[in-house]
Amino acid sequence: MPIIAPEPRPEKTLPAIREALSHPRDREGFDWGLPAAVEEARAVGDWKSMEDFTHRWWIIACDSMQHGVSVAIAENPTDIGLTCMDRAWPAVS
């Protein structure tokens, strides 16, 4: 079942997602993770990691638009103890 975020929400494109990130830490995490996701996709010849990256950051951007600020959780979520149903963030999507 797809996740339906409440309005407002950004388009599910990388430029729209980055623009929607309101906290500098979120933008830094996005900017750091994007080249890594592209490199991984190129190395394995499968763009699923890019789809996963885009989806994770879209969720964060939706939250950022709803609350005006978010926490960079797509990268290193266990460093700040974020889990969902006893699973670390990357396992939830």
Image (cartoon, rainbow, N blue to C red):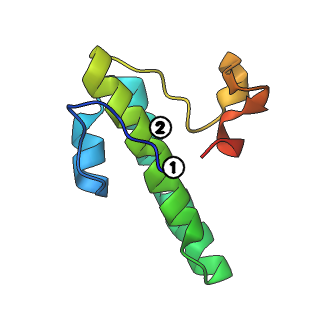
Please state which of residues 41 and 31 is positioned toward the viewer in this rendering.
41
Labelled pair 1, 2 in contact (Cβ < 8 Å): yes
Q: Is residue 9 above or below residue 12?
A: above
Q: Name the residue tied to disc 1.
A: 33
Q: Which mark is residue 17?
A: none
Indicate the position of residue 59 as horizontal and vertical percent values.
43, 38
Say what amino acid the circle numbered 1 marks. Gly
Outermost residue toward the front? Answer: 1
Say what amino acid the circle numbered 2 marks. Gly
State the residue at coordinates (60%, 79%). 46
Indicate the position of residue 83 as horizontal and vertical percent values.
70, 25
Q: Is residue 19 above or below residue 77?
A: below
Please state which of residues 81 and 28 is positioned toward the viewer in this rendering.
81
Outermost residue toward the bottom? Answer: 45
Q: Quarter-wise, where is residue 61 in the image? A: top left
Indicate the position of residue 67 as horizontal and vertical percent values.
31, 15
Mark 2 Cα within 10 Å, few/some/many (few <14, many 20+)? some
Q: Is residue 22 visible?
A: no
